[in-house]
Image: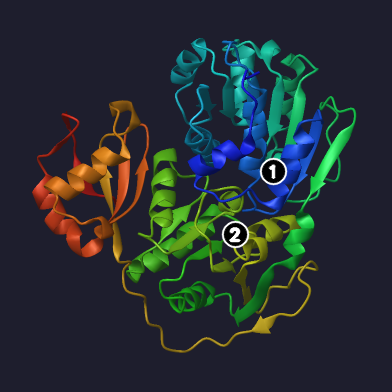
């Protein structure tokens, strides 16, 4: 344990917050005296911070062993939690492990044992099987979006992991839906629950329906989302082929958008999410991969091109909008031969779309790619300095900066992009020769 008293409020300034929300404060209080703690709260309510700060309080700087595991259902969520952990600016080492990433690179990172490992169940079970680290030293396991890990079929991998753990470790579980039961491999004795799902019922979500034919369904979707202009929109499909089919139609009409599904290369998934976050694209067409835990902006419009078979998936999708008492709109695009599932209840407004379609203008932001990142010791100040001093930009023409291991992405005033690229084509950042181009 840290020798100086741990004070949660010490992190407020680091995080740029005025105060922690009610749910986070209750979880902090319960975490100090509960070995098995379950947090039920809507998407976007701040669950990551709620468990990361108590986790940090439990770590011991004097021990060079793995002390905590954070297990998550997707690589995107793992990377997002790593960013939040690093933003807390502690002295503890963290390593992230996930499929699609080099196993050897991860094993090398685990040689000098990190205090915290953030990982997907499949990859973590591989490391446990291969002896990449000693699991017997783990004192806390966080299962974030736990129900989703089970839904994705990670039951056996989780079982492998828990068989190698000491058995007396503490557990934090989080979920955005009620858990019907807990699997037998969890060594739970007395469970304490912090339940804020009641807050989800208070959200100001408005449900709308657009009726069409099967043949015209994709075109109807395009007419619907074109009417949103530059307001941020997330379109959900059940299958990746539907995502690709919609994307093909939008592309043929020069309608700018991003896509996200599990069949994409990891670098393309990350790049598309970055362009959606930084405002380069206002429309994201996705499978349910985008319904959980991802750090994407507040969404005004959630569109269900295909309705999921189960209600909890529908709830999670809608959780991307109307977060924590905010208002939002949810839309069902329903062909005449499709039946609404039983879980669709309450008032629903039927919309008539205009016959004329006016495609929105491209976003005022474009995305700049720079071929250097954290491994080159590149920081935000280095990027801003180069763009202002060498590129001639003013701060208002520079948007969100995302620095990854080997690349950096920056939102730039679209009108300035061609001029900027001419000016900085031969520039270096921290004496590193970099390649710069508009991200495709």
Q: Within 10 Å of the Cα at label 1, are there few (<14), some (14-19), or many (20+) other Cα atoms? A: some
Is any atom of residue 370 visible in this view?
Answer: no
Up the image or down, 173 lies above or below 178; here it is above
Is any atom of residue 349 visible in this view?
Answer: yes
**Residue 62 rendering spot, x and y as whole percentages:** 58, 11
**Residue 71 rendering spot, x and y as whole percentages:** 64, 31
Q: Nearer the viewer, mark 2 or mark 1?
A: 2
Contact (Cβ within 8 Å) of mark 2 with mark 1:
no
Which mark is on residue 417? Answer: none
Q: Within 10 Å of the Cα at label 2, are there few (<14), some (14-19), or many (20+) other Cα atoms? A: many
Q: Secondary structure at mark 1?
A: helix
Q: Nearer the viewer, residue 336 or 292?
A: 292
Q: Residue furthest right?
A: 190
Q: Which residue is mark 2?
A: 320
Residue that appears at 63% across and 33% down: 7
**Residue 344 rendering spot, x and y as whole percentages:** 76, 70
Q: Quadrant of residue 226?
A: bottom left
Q: Earlier in the sequence, mark 2 or mark 1?
A: 1
Q: Quadrant of residue 166?
A: top right
Q: CA distance from mark 2 to mark 1?
A: 16 Å
Q: Which residue is mark 1?
A: 148
Instruction: Say left or right for 392 vs 343.
Output: left
Instruction: Say left or right for 424 vs 46.
Output: left
**Residue 202 rendering spot, x and y as whole percentages:** 74, 67
Up the image or down, 377 lies above or below 208; here it is above
Instruction: Say left or right for 228 vs 190.
Output: left
Residue that appears at 68% across and 12% down: 137
């Amino acid at each position: 344990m840290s020798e100086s008293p741990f004070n949660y409020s010490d992190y407020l300034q680091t995080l740029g917050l005025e105060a922690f929300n009610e749910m986070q404060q209750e979880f902090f209080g319960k975490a100090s005296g509960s070995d098995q703690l379950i947090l039920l709260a809507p998407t976007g309510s701040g669950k990551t911070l709620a468990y990361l700060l108590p986790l940090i309080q439990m770590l011991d700087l004097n021990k060079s062993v793995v002390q905590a595991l954070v297990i998550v259902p997707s690589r995107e969520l793992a990377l997002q939690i790593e960013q939040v952990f690093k933003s807390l600016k502690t002295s503890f080492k963290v390593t992230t492990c996930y499929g699609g990433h080099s196993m050897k690179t991860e094993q090398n990172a685990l040689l000098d044992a990190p205090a915290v490992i953030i990982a997907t169940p499949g990859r973590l079970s591989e490391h446990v099987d291969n002896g990449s680290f000693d699991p017997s030293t783990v004192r806390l396991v966080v299962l974030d979006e736990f129900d989703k890990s089970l839904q994705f079929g990670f039951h056996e991998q989780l079982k492998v992991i828990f068989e190698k753990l000491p058995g007396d470790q503490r557990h934090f579980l989080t979920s955005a839906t009620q858990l019907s039961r807990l699997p037998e491999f969890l060594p739970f004795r007395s469970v304490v629950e912090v339940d804020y799902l009641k807050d989800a019922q208070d959200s100001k979500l408005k449900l709308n329906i657009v009726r069409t034919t099967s043949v015209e369904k994709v075109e109807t979707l395009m007419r619907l989302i074109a009417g949103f202009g530059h307001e941020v929109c997330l379109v959900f499909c059940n299958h990746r082929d539907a995502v690709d089919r919609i994307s093909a139609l939008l592309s043929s009409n020069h309608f700018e958008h991003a896509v996200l599904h599990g069949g994409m290369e990891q670098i393309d998934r990350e790049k598309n999410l970055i362009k959606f976050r930084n405002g380069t694209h206002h429309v994201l067409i996705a499978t349910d991969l985008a319904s959980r835990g991802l750090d994407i902006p507040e969404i005004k419009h959630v569109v269900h091109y295909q309705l999921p078979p189960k209600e909890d998936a529908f709830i999670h999708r809608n959780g991307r909008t109307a977060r924590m008492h905010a208002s939002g709109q949810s839309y069902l695009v329903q062909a005449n031969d499709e039946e609404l599932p039983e879980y669709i209840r309450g008032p629903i407004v039927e919309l008539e779309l205009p016959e004329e379609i006016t495609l929105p203008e491209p976003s005022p932001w474009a995305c700049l790619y720079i071929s250097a990142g954290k491994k080159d010791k590149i920081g935000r100040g280095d990027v801003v300095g180069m763009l202002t001093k060498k590129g001639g930009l003013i701060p208002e023409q520079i948007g969100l900066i995302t620095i990854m291991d080997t690349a950096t992405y920056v939102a730039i005033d679209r009108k300035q992009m061609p001029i900027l690229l001419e000016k900085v084509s031969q520039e270096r950042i921290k004496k590193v020769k970099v390649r710069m181009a508009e991200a495709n």
